[in-house]
Image (spheres, grey):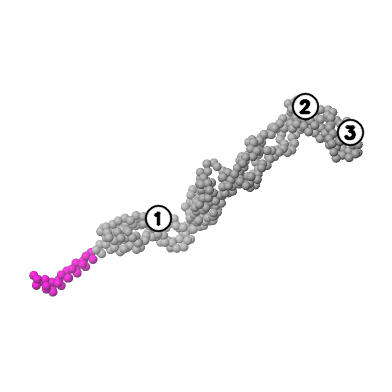
Amino acid sequence: MDKWIKSPWFTRVVSLFLALLLYMTVYLDEANTQRSADTFLPSGSEDSEIVENVPLQVLLDGEEYVVRGVPDTVNVTLEGPRSVITQAKRQQNFDIQIDLNDLGPGTHEVEVQHSGVPNQLSIFIDPRTIEVTLEERETMTLPVELDYVGRNGVDDSEVFASEPIITPSEVEVTGPKSIIERVAMVKAIVGFADLAQDGLAQNIPVKVYDTEGNELNVFVEPSNVNVEADVSISDKRYPITFEKTGQLSEDLVLQSINVNPVSATLFGTDERIDEITRLEPINVDLSEITETTTREVELPLPSGTTKIEPEKVEVEVVVEEAIEEVYEQVEIDIENLEDREITFIDPNEPEVDLTVIGTEDVLENLDINDIKVWINVEDFVEGEGYADIEVEGPEDIRVRTSEERVRIRIE
């Protein structure tokens, strides 16, 4: 036996057998596992495994088009030797992609391609084809509007001394032309309480909406803005006053003017509020009044302030029909005569008739002594001249004199 084993022919036969065995092993393994990289349907190889959510790459040179309808990921089934599958799954050094470079605008059915998959593996991609749409890309520069959440009915002018500043104030909105044409507004939505607390809100996302308030899927650059507000706001309450202009018609008498509410609150910076001592009076034009009337009047907003609350008030002008009563030969008082003497020429007595106009109740309670009639001769020199008759009485009556002036002589 030892002699046979040591024979050169034995060694040669065994070597040939081992070489044939090694060749058959390699040949059969390659025959069962190696297929073209373009084979999509898995076959009965040694093992298979699904790799989910593999990123899908889009090959598109240039920026003239926007791609729609492309999923972010696909699922891939790998089939072949377990060790190769494990390594490919762990490293994922293969690419799944669609090539859109030779396509123009419109909708296309595109085959999903792959590269970098080991030759020992077969691959099946789900989905195999994808419907994509290429649209012309368009960019618009639009202003950013500020919108609040959590305002709870509070007006921003009551909290901010000036309009909040958005930085940057404009953004570029890019997307398919069909979507860009639908853009109606660009907004930065800020928590009202957060901005009111310290006057600063940073990295606020910018949202784009259509006319119906639907958010649009577009690219915004920059996608975030900062908002800064001046929160040095004060408020102060002021009484509301009025000034009368014009005259009522002769057949009417003013009873009262009532303002509701009687005060208003003004909002502004601390410095500006401290400078304002009163609100401008409301103008009440009596010449426009023909009967008791209630009108809504807008309160003037002082410069440098942000808001007045309320913005409008009701002004009620109460009038009644007038009656007249004549008081004859009411004495005219002389003021600033001093040591001089005065003689009335026309009329020849210091008397005048008064027509008092008012309501019946007022005239019934009127004392003629409540009406003062006089002339002032302080600036008169010796000789003759004319002096205007002055009349003063209660506010709720009007007085008409029979003479507007008298002729006198000073000596």
In the image: residue 236, left or right of residue 114 = right
**Disc 3 on helix, strand or loop?**
strand
Q: Which residue is mark 2?
A: 367
Q: Amino acid at mark 2?
A: Asp
Magenta span contains residue 191: no
Q: Amino acid at mark 3?
A: Phe
In the image: residue 404, left or right of residue 312 = right
Q: Residue 49 got which mark?
A: none
Earlier in the chain: of badge 3 and badge 2, it is: 3
Q: Which residue is mark 3?
A: 344
Q: Position of residue 81 (x, y in %)?
A: 27, 60
Q: Amino acid at mark 1?
A: Asp
Q: Residues within 10 Å of mark 1 (few under 14, many from 20)?
A: few
Q: Position of residue 380 (x, y in %)?
A: 87, 39
Q: Which of the pair 184/130 is nearer the observer?
A: 184
**Disc 2 on helix, strand or loop?**
loop
Q: Which residues are magenta?
A: 1-28
Alpha carbon separation for disc pair 3 and 1: 110 Å
| Viewport quadrant of the N terminus | bottom left
Q: Which of the pair 71/161 is nearer the observer?
A: 161
Whether residue 182 appears in this view of the structure is: no
